[in-house]
Image: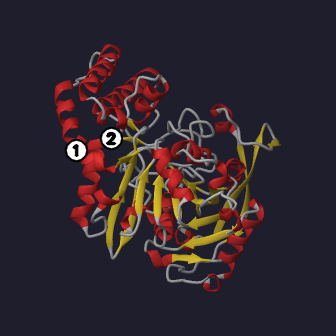
Amino acid sequence: ERERERGVGNKVTVVLGAQWGDEGKGKVVDLLAQDADMVCRCQGGNNAGHTVVVDSVEYDFHLLPSGIINPKVTAFIGNGVVIHLPGLFEEAEKNMRKGKGVEGWENRLIISDRAHIVFDFHQAVDGVQEQERQQQAGKNLGTTKKGIGPVYSAKAARSGLRICDLLADFQEFSERFKHLASQYKSMYPSLEIDMDGELEKLKTYVDRLKPMVRDGVFFMYKALHGSSKKILVEGANAALLDIDFGTYPFVTSSNCTVGGVCTGLGMPPQNVGEVYGVVKAYTTRVGIGAFPTEQNNEIGELLQTRGKEVGVTTGRKRRCGWLDLVLIKYAHMINGFTALALTKLDILDVLPEIKVGVAYKVDGEIIQHFPANQEVLHKVEVQYETLPGWKTDTSAVRTFEELPENAQKYIFYIEDHLGVPVKWIGVGKSRESMIQLF
């Protein structure tokens, strides 16, 4: 409160993935959104996938902040997010058909006028680029083909178009749109682009969009410096998919670490409050790229089937392996987590012993850092700590004390190794199955 009086304003609570995505961020956001006033997305696009279960209805979110499920929440899509407009409206309508969860979403959604637009041709280009990568190098990046890479490329190349452009002079917008489309067409001759058709479609969104669009910087400033508010920021993707810090080039095209919150919403770092890291009790990865603790064996298969590890956005099977604390330590160095949420602990219930990656060796020497180079990362030898399993069903557990002793020890081990407290433990799908420790 003293800080508020000194004019720092409200602080935002941030939820970030600490591994390769699919850690269960949606679950933590859902928990925190129950008493939030505002929930924001600061980066990524509809390549993210969050599933939230409310009153036994499963809602899927890709672009909308999943906190919009709370009727009292104002959802904000910041300037760092890239927006595929048909995707946005389809997602809202699909969730409307499922249940009452997102009723009145159009009156509760604010979109920054500086956010870049993902066009259908960006998505088509994404597909063509992936095909080319496969043909040339024998490996693609495993993108979701949602146009995310191409639109962030256009943004960096300063040829992108933003929400503010769509809502200004449509004639001018159309010309720039056609220019951008023909640039892609000359680069990828096989590309089919229906320019007039897409422009017609975009024109139909203008009137629906107008009431939702604001100057994002001013809107955010007012939210931070107005009355006391609980503001939540939900990260998409995760630390190891970050364009700067992830396992490049097998990463996404935006910053999914804490810095992306300031640049993606237009706010200063002193307004960042709690930063929660979401960690799955084991590790998963979709698509290709190095994965030191991967288990290409019956352990990996067990985790995949028990954990139902299939991508929300792509439907791809996820690769599975032991918890890697080297990687989480690295994510913590970048993000400065104030606490962790450890999810899917119940998936480990059947294992007699559990391994945890605690160090990497290269040429027999322990290395202190997380290797930037993929070739090096591929050849690291993981040093494991083996902990006893608990072989007890934990899915009905609702307090830390009820957890089997060895499950408690697993948590303590993680906390001690990282020097970050675990605030939540997830043992199932529903809201109730998140055990809060403090």
Separation of marks 1 and 2 at Cα, in angstroms: 16 Å
Report whether 142 appears left or right of 299: left
Q: Identity of the amino acid at label 2?
A: His
Toward the right, the furthest residue is 365
Report whether 38 appears left or right of 106: right
Above/below status of 365 relative to 269: above
Q: How many marks?
A: 2
Report whether 247 appears left or right of 304: right
Most foreground residue, 394 or 246:
246
User: How packed is label 1: few (under 14 Cα within 10 Å), some, or many (20 or more)?
Assistant: few
User: Residue 84: which disc?
Assistant: 2
- Circle 2 — which element? loop
User: Residue 207: which disc?
Assistant: 1
Above/below status of 95 relative to 169: below
Most foreground residue, 401 or 210:
210
Foreground tag (1 vs 2): 1
**Residue depicted at 68% across the width and 71% down the height:** 411
From the top left corner, tell me how far across and down residue 98 is, in percent. 24, 65
Toward the top, the furthest residue is 186
Quadrant hosting residue 108 = bottom left
First along the sequence among labels 1 and 2: 2
Quadrant hosting residue 414 = bottom right
